[in-house]
Image (cartoon, rainbow, N blue to C red):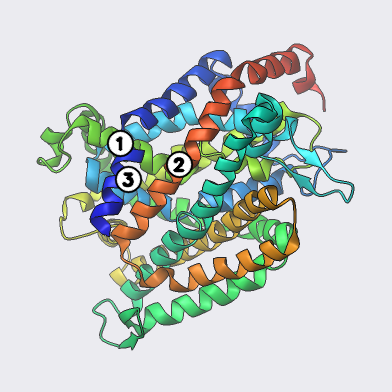
Amino acid sequence: MTAILTKIDDFVWGVPLMVLILAGGLLLTIRLRCLQTHKLGLALKWMVKNEEGGIGEVSSFAALCTALSATIGTGNIVGVATAISLGGPGALFWMLVAAFLGMATKFTEGLLAVKYRTVKKDGKVLGGPFYYIEKGMGSSWKWLAKLFAIFGILAGLLGIGTITQVNGVANAVQSVFDPDAVKTVTLPLLGTHSWSVVITAIVVTAVVALVIIGGLKRIARVSEIIVPFMAILYIVSVLILIFSNITALPGAIVTIVKGAFNPRSVAGGVAGSMLIAMRSGVARGIFSNEAGLGSAPIAAAAAQTKEPVRQGLVSMTGTFIDTIVICTMTGLSIVMTGAYQIKELKGGQITNYAFQNGLPFSNKVCSLILMLCLMFFAFTTILGWDYYSERCLEYLTGGKKSPLQVYRWLYILAVLIGPFMTVAAVWTIADIFNGLMAIPNMIALFALSGVAAKETKAFFDAGKHLEK
């Protein structure tokens, strides 16, 4: 099964999809006049300043936190480590290139989500790629909108939303409390596992169930509290690591840049080629920040705003925070400590090694810090992706309640069994569904790039960004 999944993954994440996503980001960067550089300051200002009198279900900041709750997850810790172990340090360089272009992509997604969203009589808002495909490209493209929604449901249920997240948490908990798997239990059909993994699965599932049954507003409230806290905790931890090993920083930067163009020379043949470094960096970067996937605009559509461009700028900050800040810090810590060179380590174990060998604390404390970060990151991602996939299902079913109720319980079940699946299979499945989601969304972004450029120019020409 793993071999079959790997072949499918290689096909989905081949050169055509990478070119599609990068070319889309480049096209939007050009058409928007490199907006992600000269409007970043304004975007960061609006990120924490909610718009007054806007139409929507939650504030712009809450919508961003909901989107960040889904993007800041195990991809920032486990995904970065996996990318560097597969593609060498150069994968981080390509991850940042993809993120820079992805900021223009995320801006466009947020803009289109608000422009083409639907507001129901009861005040409930529904929007995202399925609506900007259907309304923006025309009803004849509704089949493409439905295809995106199907892939979105599968990604949430079987990939990025559940299994990968809780799997990363369980591994982190085991590394702290039972690293040698001494206390184990055999479960029917699931094999033998550490009690720490079993307990983690039960606790996380129970807490997730309590939150997601409350819907978007409860998810948004939880995200507004947890997301800023978890991001600050992780950033401070990595900053301590970097400053504690500051003499290794220049060499790490050189290694990353060299590895981007000649991975074999700096990765001892592990990377294989520049293409693998690019593929690893782009794929894991998109897994982390979701630019081009079409997931974040589903949350952006619910924001209380009257201006699509304004919400586009707020959405853009998600990619900046997620990848350019947090993923870069993770990557630097891994390269500075040489963790990626330990062949027997995989996924989160690589980042754990970096923390243990880079932070000025005991190994137990370092593992505990990483475990807490992973738990918060993964928990909020599970919540965010439940919202995304439910909205996809709502679009397909016309808002019928019974399918949503059934789906929520299936989602909870996926969280419960996630820790008992193999890491390789988990990440491969997630990659496949990510890639499949990106295809219809990127087609729409190419088709509607002119609309985004026109809306943006009109907004700034009218001086709306100068209004209080």
Which residue is disc 2 drawn over?
436
Q: Residue type at mark 1? A: Arg
Q: Is residue 463 left or right of residue 64?
A: right
Disc 2 vs disc 1: Cβ atoms closer than 8 Å?
A: no
Locate residue 427: give its quadrant: bottom left
Q: In this rendered view, identify the residue nearer to me: 50 or 82.
A: 82
Q: Position of residue 445 (x, y in %)?
A: 57, 26
Asked if residue 315 lies left or right of residue 336, the reply is right
Give me the C-alpha separation between circle 2 and circle 1.
16 Å
Q: Are marks 1 and 3 in contact (CB under 8 Å)?
A: no
Considering only order in the chain, which callout, 2 or 3, is on the residue closer to the N terminus? 3
The amino acid pointed to by label 2 is Leu
- Residue 410 on image: x %, y %: 56, 68
Kindly identify which residue carries mark 1: 279
Tell which circle, 2 or 1, labels the residue nearer the N-terminal end: 1
Label 3 to label 2: alpha-carbon separation: 10 Å
Whole-Å distance between the Cαs marked 1 and 3? 11 Å
| Residue 171 seen in the current view | yes
Q: Eyeballing the image, is 441 above or below 68?
A: above
> Can see residue 112?
no
Going by the numbered disc 3, the residue's amino acid type is Asp
Name the mark on residue 9.
Answer: 3
The residue that appears at 22% across and 53% down in the rendered structure is 339
- Image: 103 above or below 65: above
